[in-house]
Image (cartoon, rainbow, N blue to C red):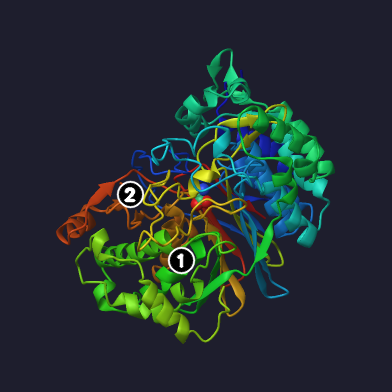
Amino acid sequence: MNQLTGENVTHKFMAANLFRGRVYSFGLGIALGVQCFSFLPVPAIARPPQLEPTETEEVMVAASHPLATAAGVKILAQGGNAIDGAIATALAISVVQPYSAGLGGGGFALVFLNQEQQVRALDFRERAPLGAGPDMYLDDHGEVMPRASLDGYRAVATPGTIAGLAELHRQYGELPWADLVQPALDYAQQGFIINETFHRMLQWRWPALRANPEAAALLSYQGRPLTVGDRFQQPDLAKTLGAIAANPQVFYQGWIGEALVTDMAQHQGLITLRDLQEYRPVWRSPLCGTFLELEVCSMPPPSSGGVALIQMLNLLAKLDIQQNLQYQSASDRGHALAAVMQIAYGDRAVYLGDSDFVPVPVTVLTSLDYAAERVKEIPRRQSRSQAQVRPASPQLIQSLEQRQESTNTSHLTVVDRHRNAVSLTFTLNGPFGSGVVVPGTGIFLNNEMDDFAAAADSPNLFGLVGTTPSAAQPLANAIAPGKRPLSSMSPTIVREKGELRYALGSPGGSRIISTVLQILLSLELDQANALEAVTAPRIHHQWQPDTLFVESDISQAQIQDWSKWGYSLQEQGRWGNANVIRVLPDGRLQGATDPRGNGAAAGF
Ligand code: GLY
């Protein structure tokens, strides 16, 4: 067993192997209790007195693990573009953070092509298996079976990661695909040292992982779960990546897909060869809005991220959050944020789902007309209960639909020397997904089925609900064969007069959207640098539960004000693991990863 800490090994490995012959700028997030997925509390941190972000001239990668950042930077140093860098970084994350995202999951990528002046959105979200149905998690009495959508084979949706990354490469990659897979393959073969975060995630998910013999064997050493300081090697995953390097289709049509469906068939899972063969990533129009001088683009459905982000920015613009003297104190700003979050998350619960299956009133919800109607409800210095914040009535949606002029509306981060950018968020959903590892492949499978609404008003892992104004109306996010579960992932690209300003995103389940919003506001309204923006304490309100969640380093003065104004407050450690790269006025890059995680921003 290697007794070195993960961070030591990381630095030595990077210095020795990756950063030869160049001076690299490298900023590490402070290793703390990371909250990638959830809202489990972690202890408060002491903020460092000065928050210096990473700055580089040409290229930058910001990702949630230093080894993944190093993989991306290596590819950019070989002449790859932002898309190549993002693919290599994502594949490396799949190896070094198997609890967070990987080959057995899915995601979204926003791509900014500078020369073409185009932002494109790729959806490689998982799909419900064709054998899935709306009642699949209900028992004979119509009750939701606890954990059925979270643990084991029936929690798994058809994975999209490899199809998505291969499609990104097919369209825009410049280096050979196999070169992009190589750093991940090296990490799988050589192994890496388990850090505190990995260990904590493993402990949290051990009950589910232990129930799967393949996962239990992979994640154990001498009969005990792996722990901090152990070296984690993944020979099966290295074999899998070798096959994918030769031909990514092997995941869907070759021996890897066959291993997956054989395992499914033996354990009452639903994914068949047909599910795999029919899986396709989808290019979608990104959803863009304006805020101050900025064009903010994020992910359309099946993510709720873009709709909610633009909705909240519109509402804040209508409140004139920048100038209005009513909103200049931290407490008043926080109240405005909580109020707009309640509105956006309430609408999410009713109206958002996979727009290939259900009509989603995207145009209305992201319109300034709608924001103008809803902003009137926000009281001064007074909270509103969940019952008072009613989602938009179908009548209001209908009347605004008639007023729309057009129906045309619309996390690792990599920026290359041409100022192309990729903002990519992908996931297995919960830590280690469903806890299932496909025998012989090293692939952890997602539990993305939990992102569907298993029944009306039944909260998922993140406390999110799907609901309807009346029992007669179908749930927008109900399960259906081939449908994509509603996501909150919000990879975001922000431009000003066509020029790239920021690329950003975060994990954090339902809190992704509110995290991205607050980072953007820190950058724009507070002129924070990248590290200050990702470090600033966060709040979150998701309509249901009727609670304003606050991070543990929010000031006591704010807490007292919000309590006085009627908010029901809950302090919950710190959450999210964001990263951001910004283009400075002189054209250089500034980036940072979240001190809540162990990530790194680096480049040259
Ligand atoms: N699985 C979390 C999300 O997609 O929002």
Q: Is residue 204 above or below residue 529?
A: above
Amino acid type of the residue tagged 1 in the rendering: Leu
Amino acid type of the residue tagged 2 in the rendering: Glu
Residue under the point 67% across and 39% down = 14
Is 291 displayed left or right of 263 in the figure?
left
- Give SS at disc 2: loop
Is 559 displayed left or right of 109 in the figure?
left
In terms of image quadrants, where is residue 398? bottom left
Tell me, yes or no, if residue 31 can be seen here: yes
CB within 8 Å, label 1 to label 2: no
Is 23 displayed left or right of 551 in the figure?
right
Q: Nearer the viewer, residue 90 or 357?
A: 357
Mark 2 residue crowding within 10 angstroms, few (<14) / some (14–19) / many (20+): many
Is 352 displayed left or right of 9 in the figure?
left
Indicate if the residue with disc 1 has its beta carbon within 8 Å of ligand 1: no
Where does residue 421 sit, x and y in percent of width and height? 65, 63
In terms of image quadrants, where is residue 223? top right
Q: Real-space Cα distance between discs 1 and 2?
A: 20 Å
The quadrant of the rendering that contains the C terminus is: bottom right
- Give SS at disc 1: helix
Q: Is residue 510 above or below residue 294?
A: above
In terms of image quadrants, where is residue 98? top right
Q: Is residue 517 above or below residue 451?
A: below
The circle drawn on residue 432 is none
Give the total of numbered labels: 2
According to the image, label 2 marks what residue?
551
Residue under the point 58% across and 22% down = 216
According to the image, label 1 marks what residue?
309
Q: Nearer the viewer, residue 118 or 331?
A: 118
Where does residue 524 sit, x and y in percent of width and height? 44, 70
Where does residue 379 sit, x and y in percent of width and height? 22, 71
